[in-house]
Image (cartoon, grey):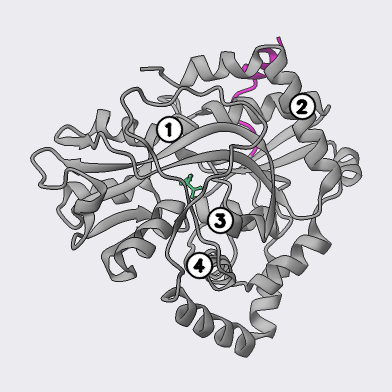
Amino acid sequence: MALQSNDGEGKPPVTELPHSDMQALCQSDTIAALIFCLSVLALSGAHAPALPKGEPSPAFPKFVLLQKGSSPMKRRTFISLMSVMAAAGVLSLAGCSSNTSSSTASSTAASASASATAANKLETIQSNGKLVIALEGAWQPWSFHDESDTLVGYDVEVSRAIAEKLGLELQIDDMDFDAALLSVQQGKADIAMAGITVTDERMAVMSFSDSYATGIQSVIVPEGSDIASVDDLAGKKIGTQRGTTGYLYCSDDFGEDAVVAYDNGLTAVQALNNGQVDAVVIDNEPAKAYVESNPGLKILDTSYAEEDYAIGMAKGNTALLEAVNAALEELKADGTLQAIVDKYIKAE
Ligand code: GLN
């Protein structure tokens, strides 16, 4: 099978892509960037209240089992233009502080124009012979480094299978979550796969494949915590990952001062262990992995939100979007996706 023949290849090359386009934008337009940052800071306090979203899930059927015993979940969306702009700004600002292979500051406008011009068209990708994926390699079980430091996981295998279907070699760029979002918007990576939740705000700045899985925002607390429900987070310090929906939901519901944004899930959980925060809001599968390896922590039975994960791409890259969706369909039909789910995602 295609995936198995690729499994033996070991860790794919990790290549640093040029940042020059966004750096040039940041350097040449410092004043505009400053004005933008200030306006985003002003807007970020002006989120409309989150409303339940009654729409059905995207057409692609779910095949990742939800946690048994989950309480009814709420879907969330921020619907005002103000919050769309603010959320896009948060993503851009997150890039300002990112210390990894991502670049420096950008504005939504810069990202949008970069998407339009830098989006690798399918023909260019094909002539290069490789598909570049941005993923978060510290995101167990979706993508993570195993004992031998090889990058493994659902995202890794599914993206290899997609690349193979498209007749391409896969190049993996491993980075923090917020950097992965920017990477496709800026055309540095062709696709991003990192448990990326489809939201209206993100759809304004990037395109998404059909949904390939469902995730849940979970709450991790120390055993013995007085936090027993999402509502109990009021008045507490909450750790999240920078640029994630967990961060956006918590800052919307409990105020930005209550929420601390960490580089990744591990540093958020370390802060919880050290008592710097009272809870961590994070996606359910990584939450399970963290609780397993950190005795004294537990996941609340109640869930914060249910979400759909999809593969992110630059906006306007329609041919690539269609090719990725067709590959996903085939991989679903031939059982490959389910086999990868069974390998990495434990049904309860
Ligand atoms: N699902 C969350 C989001 O899209 C978090 C993803 C992640 O941290 N990799 O914001």
Q: On the image, numbered disc 4 is attached to which residue?
A: 90
**Secondary structure state at the residue bearing disc 1:** loop
The residue drawn where x is 52% and y is 69% is: 83
Residue 197 located left or right of residue 116: left
State which quarter of the image contains the C terminus. top left
Name the residue type under label 3: Ala
Name the residue type under label 4: Val
The residue drawn where x is 21% and y is 49% is: 272
Nearest to the eye among marks 1 and 2: give it. Answer: 2
Q: How many marks?
A: 4
Name the residue type under label 2: Ala
Nearest to the eye among marks 3 and 4: give it. Answer: 4
Find out whether residue 5 is within the magenta segment. yes
| Picture quadrant of residue 302 | top left
Residue 140 numbered mark, or none: 1
Nearest to the eye among marks 1 and 4: give it. Answer: 4
**Image x and y of residue 106, in percent:** 62, 72
Q: CB of residue at label 4: within 8 Å of ligand 1?
A: no
Residue 327 numbered mark, or none: 2
Q: Is residue 235 above or below residue 106?
A: above
Residue 303 located left or right of residue 299: right
**Image x and y of residue 14, in percent:** 62, 42
Q: Characterize the local packing of mark 1: few (<14), some (14-19) or many (20 or more) Cα atoms within 10 angstroms.
A: many
Name the residue type under label 1: Gln
Q: Which residues are magenta?
A: 1-13
The earlier-in-sequence mark between 4 and 2 is 4
